[in-house]
């Protein structure tokens, strides 16, 4: 495997413009001759499918939900970044680029990140034209708020429903193309394998989740927009259906997997409340604009928050990071929350929580003003916890949220497997070792609306694509393998549920490869994961049949992939013997307990090549070159 990132030559600010001119184009009449498969219909997938159909390509779109409207993008709350500089507070494309590079702890590509910052302004214009109801100032101008990792206000938002509103816009564009016949929509359908013919991705095997039928689908290119792999940890902020299966199957068919150990821990989640919890709930990072985070100064102080005097409170982020305060990047906020709880100063029944307090903001701005900004978030918190955040501080604790790792892609967003593209969270490209808040929606829409439609044509115009049908032997072979795996899962008839195995695996990863990691714990995990996987294939119980709706079977198929993927995740974490961003190696920290990078040995993207489950994968190093920014130790003080 040879990795070619295809970064264009020339000045950073001119790369994307020149690249769009230099790539090959497809004649409008020839576009109708090409079929493109898009898997996933969240922000990245829906925007890509709609845009490519508008350009003239024939698109087959797939979602395991009953409607694209139910994609997990709908759960994003806080906002979407853009360098419009409407508040006139010093923002620019270059500053957004720099904040993203620095926030990712200098572990992402300059060219990709600058392109993202450049496109951000087009996204806002496009979404406003669609009618997205962004919050506005009294005079009608679009409103902005600040987010972690930045000292400017550049985040556009629609209360705490930004993802939902943006998805409605993308869904509207997609629905128009479905009606026009350019997009064929396949709902309640899950991809179970990628089909490779002649060294190119030429189709997929899909399973109808209602009938159980396996179907074959052929295309000239396949686009994965299937999100991240946070649910490998069992408890995460992701919807329970979110999984890594499509990306993992692509990896096993030849697509390199990059930086799998880069997992983001989000600092503002509702704490775990019991052993039988199936997922965690995110409270938007936007709450850190007006909420102040604190714990008691004394260990073991279990008094109610309103009985703890001001001089006995530790606003630890404001104390340690005076320049950024509560708006430090997510990795710093998460790690410091864990630190004070480990000291015995955590709050709540478990002691694994900190306060997010709005008393000062309500006193300064008024309750109505706070309700206008965050009312739906406060209501959600109240419904889940039965506590009123207007009168009692919220309790929050870090949780697994987003994954910066993903399938390796070049500047065109194509994986190392020709004809297979990865967009949105499923690729690794833009966030380095830590994603800044409000950048996920930005990347998803940038990839779908603006990047992929301008780069996929280069492949379709130049690649030799012999005609293949669903009767091709590779199609039959992939379908047979998928059926055999399903039959094997159903035949085991063991004594443990899928959730039981998933919980055991997730707990191991959280303990050994979560917020803090060390070589000893990672080696222990590498020994334990194959044992859990072997036990899974001997003792899992999957009831029902393969010929109808069977959610236990769906889950078993996905957890079987998690069992394999987890080993790669831990192996990557062990290999990266440095701390950077959200990846904190306890052996690599400053005297003040901050992450300590090793730029001499680890300034690269770790791209892993599959060699078989019984063999170690091959590590390829995609070297990171910094020409515009200087590698410095991050400081938010």
Image: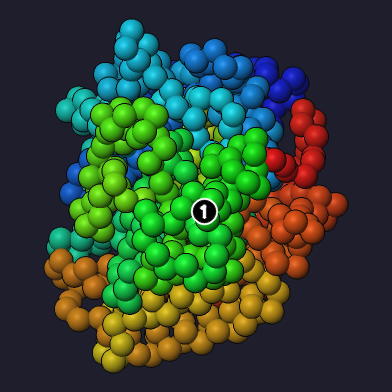
The answer to whether any part of residue 58 appears in the image is: no
**Colouring:** rainbow
Left or right side of 461 for 592:
right
x and y, in percent, of residue 512 in the image: 58, 74
x and y, in percent, of residue 501 in the image: 38, 80
Left or right side of 102 for 343:
left
**Foreground pick, 270 / 208:** 270
**Foreground pick, 608 / 364:** 364
Look at the image and tell me in which quarter the C terminus lies.
Answer: top right
Mark 1 lies on a secondary structure that is: strand
Left or right side of 266 for 13:
right
- Residue at 69% x, 33% y is 110
Query: How many tags in the picture?
Result: 1
Residue 476 lies in quadrant: bottom left
Q: Which residue in the protein does label 1 denote?
A: 313
- Residue at 50% x, 35% y is 147
Alpha-carbon neighbours of circle 1 within 10 Å: few (<14), some, or many (≥20)? Answer: some
Residue 370, compared with residue 209, is above or below; it is above
Residue 590 lies in quadrant: bottom right
- Residue at 53% x, 33% y is 459
The answer to whether any part of residue 346 appears in the image is: yes
Residue 422, compared with residue 190, is above or below; it is above
- Residue at 49% x, 40% y is 437
Q: In this view, which residue lies farthest toward the right?
A: 600
x and y, in percent, of residue 249 in the image: 45, 61
x and y, in percent, of residue 529 in the image: 53, 80
Q: In this view, which residue lies farthest toward the top?
A: 139
Look at the image and tell me in which quarter the N terminus lies.
Answer: bottom right
């Amino acid at each position: 495997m040879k990795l070619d990132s295809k970064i264009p030559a020339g000045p950073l600010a001119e790369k994307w413009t020149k690249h769009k001119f230099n790539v090959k184009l497809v004649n409008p009449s020839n576009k109708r001759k090409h079929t493109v498969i898009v898997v996933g219909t969240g922000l990245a997938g829906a925007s890509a499918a709609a845009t490519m159909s508008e350009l003239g390509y024939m698109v087959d779109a797939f979602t395991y939900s009953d409607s694209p409207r139910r994609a997990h993008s709908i759960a994003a709350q806080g906002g979407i970044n853009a360098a419009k500089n409407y508040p006139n507070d010093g923002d620019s494309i270059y500053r957004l680029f720099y904040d993203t590079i620095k926030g990712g702890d200098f572990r992402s590509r300059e060219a990709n990140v600058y392109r993202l910052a450049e496109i951000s302004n087009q996204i806002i214009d496009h979404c406003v034209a669609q009618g997205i109801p962004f919050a506005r100032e009294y005079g009608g101008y679009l409103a902005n708020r600040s987010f972690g990792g930045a000292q400017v206000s550049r985040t556009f938002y629609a209360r705490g429903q930004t993802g939902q509103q943006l998805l409605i816009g993308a869904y509207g564009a997609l629905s128009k193309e479905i009606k026009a016949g350019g997009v064929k929509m396949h709902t309640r359908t899950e991809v179970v394998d990628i089909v490779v013919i002649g060294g190119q991705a030429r189709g997929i095997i899909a399973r109808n989740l209602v009938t159980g039928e396996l179907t074959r689908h052929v295309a000239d290119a396949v686009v994965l927009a299937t999100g991240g792999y946070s649910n490998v940890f069992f408890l995460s902020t992701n919807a329970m259906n979110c999984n890594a299966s499509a990306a993992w199957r692509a990896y096993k068919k030849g697509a390199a997997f990059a930086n799998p150990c880069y997992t983001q821990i989000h600092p503002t989640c509702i704490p775990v409340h019991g052993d039988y919890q199936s997922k965690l709930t995110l409270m938007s990072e936007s709450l850190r604009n007006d909420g102040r985070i604190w714990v008691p100064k004394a260990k073991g102080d279990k008094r109610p928050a309103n009985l703890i005097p001001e001089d006995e409170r530790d606003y630890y982020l404001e104390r340690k990071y005076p320049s950024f305060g509560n708006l430090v990047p997510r990795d710093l906020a998460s790690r410091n929350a864990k630190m004070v709880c480990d000291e015995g100063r955590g709050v709540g029944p478990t002691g694994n929580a900190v306060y997010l307090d709005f008393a000062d903001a309500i006193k300064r701005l008024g309750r109505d003003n706070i309700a206008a900004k965050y009312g739906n978030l406060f209501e959600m918190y109240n419904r889940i916890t039965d506590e009123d955040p207007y009168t009692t501080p919220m309790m929050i604790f870090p949780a697994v949220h987003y994954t910066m790792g993903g399938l390796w892609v070049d500047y065109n967003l194509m994986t190392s497997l020709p004809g297979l593209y990865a967009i949105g969270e499923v690729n690794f490209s833009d966030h380095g070792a830590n994603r800044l808040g409000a950048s996920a929606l930005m990347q998803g829409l940038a990839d779908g609306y603006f990047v992929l439609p301008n780069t996929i044509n280069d492949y379709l115009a130049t690649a030799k694509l012999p005609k293949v049908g669903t009767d091709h032997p590779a199609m039959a072979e992939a379908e047979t393998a998928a059926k055999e795996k399903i039959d094997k899962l159903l035949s085991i008839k063991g004594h443990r549920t899928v959730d039981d195995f998933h919980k055991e695996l997730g707990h191991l990863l959280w303990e050994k490869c979560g917020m803090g990691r060390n070589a000893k714990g990672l080696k222990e995990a590498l020994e334990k994961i194959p044992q859990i996987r072997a036990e899974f294939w001997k003792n899992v119980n999957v009831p029902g049949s393969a010929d109808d709706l069977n959610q236990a079977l769906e889950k078993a198929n996905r957890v079987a992939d998690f069992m394999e993927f987890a080993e790669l995740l831990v192996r990557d974490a062990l290999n990266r013997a440095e701390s950077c961003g959200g990846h904190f190696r306890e052996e690599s920290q400053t005297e003040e307990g901050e992450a300590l990078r090793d730029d001499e040995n680890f300034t690269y993207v770790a791209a892993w090549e599959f060699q078989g489950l019984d063999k170690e994968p091959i590590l390829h190093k995609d070297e990171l070159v910094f020409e515009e920014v200087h590698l410095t130790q991050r400081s938010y003080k």
